[in-house]
Amino acid sequence: MRLARVTFALLAGLTPAAAQSSKPGIAPAWDVQATLKQLISQVEQYKGVVDKLKIQEWIQKGAPDAYLRQQQVVRTEVGYLDLVSGRLSAQPEKLSLALDALFRLQSLEMLTASLSEGAARYQDRAVADQLSVLLNQNSNTRTQLRQYVLDLSVNKEKEYDIVEREAQRCQATLNRPVTPAPAPARTVKSSSKQGKK
């Protein structure tokens, strides 16, 4: 009976689901991938609405040229966020990718909020409302990504602490003075020839 339980535990540990599961406190890889897929879908919608903005007409109405640059940056950031999210989906344990995705998303949202204000003032309240709705819909996804980055960074800190303690322990072991083993006592053999003279 015990052998059966041990065998089952070993087999369960080798399943693909177990290989895909994450460490305690961190969302599993499939949850992160689903969040990223949803994020990309929402971000593509940003781009679609931002493409409808008639920034040149805004400028003719007295809007600052900065809106044109913001529109270009949003288009570019959507592409970069798509790329980073794809890489993060393939390597969900990579903190640098998670941070990159979060920072790009925050930048994208900040620029989109600015463009929404510009659209309300210089174009059409309906377009501004579309952008505002997208920002609100994205709130849950942004929160999930932010929490994942936080959990991942806490986990990486714990891993670093463990590695640091182990390195210190190994260094202490290596620096410990080695006491040489005492040499075996030499026995002097007496020569029988010396006594016969």
Image: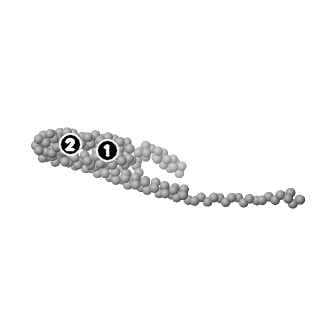
Marks 2 and 1, how far apart in space?
Answer: 26 Å
First in residue order: circle 2 vs circle 1? 1
Q: Is residue 163 above or below residue 85?
A: below
Residue that mark 1 sits on: 36
Q: Is residue 179 above or below residue 112?
A: below
Depth check: give the residue in front, 3 or 132.
132
Depth check: give the residue in front, 160 or 43.
160
Q: Nearer the viewer, mark 2 or mark 1?
A: 2
Q: Are marks 2 and 1 in contact (CB under 8 Å)?
A: no
Residue that mark 2 sits on: 69
Q: Residue at x 37, y 51 (%)?
A: 152
Q: Position of residue 69 (x, y in %)?
A: 20, 42
Q: Residue at x 38, y 44 (%)?
A: 91
Q: Position of residue 82 (x, y in %)?
A: 30, 41
Quadrant where the C terminus sits is bottom right
Q: Secondary structure at mark 2?
A: helix
Depth check: give the residue in front, 46 or 118.
118
Furthest toward the front, the residue is: 197
Position of 33 compared to 11: left or right? Answer: left
Residue 185's quadrant in the figure? bottom right
Residue 88's quadrant in the figure? top left
Q: Position of residue 36 (x, y in %)?
A: 31, 44
Position of 187 compared to 14: left or right? Answer: right
Q: Position of residue 22 (x, y in %)?
A: 40, 49
